[in-house]
Amino acid sequence: MTDDDKFFERLRVDARPLRYQPDEVTLARIRARIRDRIGGGSPQPTVALLLARWFRPLAATLAAISLAAVIGVATFGSDELTVRESAVEITAAGDVYSVGN
Amino acid sequence: MSNDDPLEAHAIARVQQGDASAYDYLVSKYLPRVVSIARGVVRNAHDAEDLAQEAFVKAYESIGRFRAGEPFGPWIYRIVTNAALDVVKHRTKFRQEELVDNAAAARRDDSDLGALRGELARRIDAAIDELPEMQRLVARLHLVEELDHQEIAAATGLSDGTVRSHLSLARRKLRERLADLYGDNDD
C-alpha cells in the first residue's frame, strides 16, 4: 500500500461521521410518501408481461374453438353410429331398401 | 455486477409483476444511503429527502426496464446522483436565487452538522467541498459513502478509469489542504 493509499484509508475512517443518517421518523415519513405516490399506479410492464396480456385471450379463444371442434366431432361420430345401428331394411317387389331413422 | 441478495431479486421480480407492496423491501434497504448520497451533493437535508423520494418513484415507474439479476443499489444511486447534480446545476444557473437559497440552506445545514462528530470531520467536509464538481462527487462517494470504484462508476455513469483519475486528483488536493492534520508523511 502506497503512502497515498494509506492517507486515503485514514481519511475514509475520519470521514465516516460525515455520512448523513436520517432518523427513523424521517425515514418513515419518506417511506410513507413513496408508498402514497406509487400506491395508485402500477409500474411499466415488462415485454414478457405485455406479450402475456396479448396472448392470454388469444390462447383462451383457441382453446375454446378446439374444445368445440372436439365436442362436434364426437357428437357427429356418435350420430353416424346411431344411424347405422338403427337402419331399417324394407323389401319391396324383391328389392331391398335400407332406410336410416 | 450480480445481485447477491435473493430477497432483493425476489422483490424486484414481484414489483415487475405489479405487486407494489414488494417495493417496501427495496425502499427500506436503500433509503438511508440514497438520502445520504443526495445530501452529500445538494448539501441540504430537506432537498435530499425530496430527491430520495423522487428517485424511488422514478425507479418504480421504470422498473420494467430493470434487468433481472442486477443489484438495485447502483441503479437507484445513479438515479439520485443525476437528480441531485441537476439540482446543483439549476442552482448554479440561477445564482442570484441561489444566494438567497444558500442562506436558508446553510441554516438548515448547520443543524444537520450538529449531528456530525468532531472538528476533524468538519475540516474534511470543507476540504471535499472545495474540490471541482466531479472530483467532489467521486471523493464523497468513496470516502463518505464508502463505495468502491466499480460502484462509483455505476452510480455516476463514468468509466472506471475516469473514476480512478478523479479520485487520484482529489486525493492529491485533499492531502495538500489537510496537510496540517495529516502531515506530509502518514507513517
Image: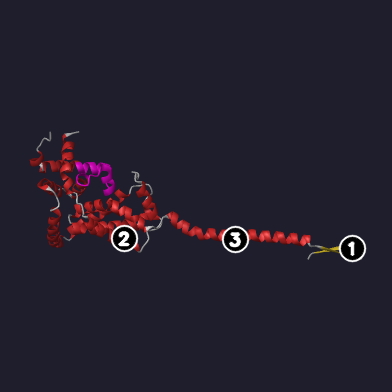
Which of the image's four quarters has the N terminus of chain B? top left
Discs 1, 2 touching: Cβ within 8 Å? no
B82 within the magenta span: no
Colour scheme in use? secondary structure
* Distance (Cα) linking label 3 and label 1: 46 Å
* Distance (Cα) linking label 1 and label 2: 89 Å
Q: How many marks?
A: 3
In the image, which is nearer the foreground, mark 1 or mark 2?
A: 2
> Which residue, as the protein is rendered here, is positioned at the far left?
B180
Residue linked to disc 3: A65
Type of the residue with mark 3 = Ile
Residue linked to disc 2: A35
Q: Is residue A84 above or below residue B186?
A: below
Q: Is residue B98 left or right of residue B157?
A: left
- Per the rendered image, the range of residues in magenta is B142-167
- Looking at the rendered structure, whether the residues under marks 3 and 2 are on a common chain is answered as yes
Q: Earlier in the sequence, mark 3 or mark 2?
A: 2
Q: Which chain carries label 3?
A: A
Density class for disc 3 (Cα within 10 Å; few <14, some 14-19, many ≥20) is: few
Residue linked to disc 1: A95
Q: Is residue B180 above or below residue B55?
A: above
Type of the residue with mark 1 = Asp
Q: Which residue is drawn at 18% across and 45% down?
A: A16
SS category of the residue bearing label 3: helix
SS category of the residue bearing label 2: helix
Q: In this view, does B131 lie to the left or right of B66?
A: left
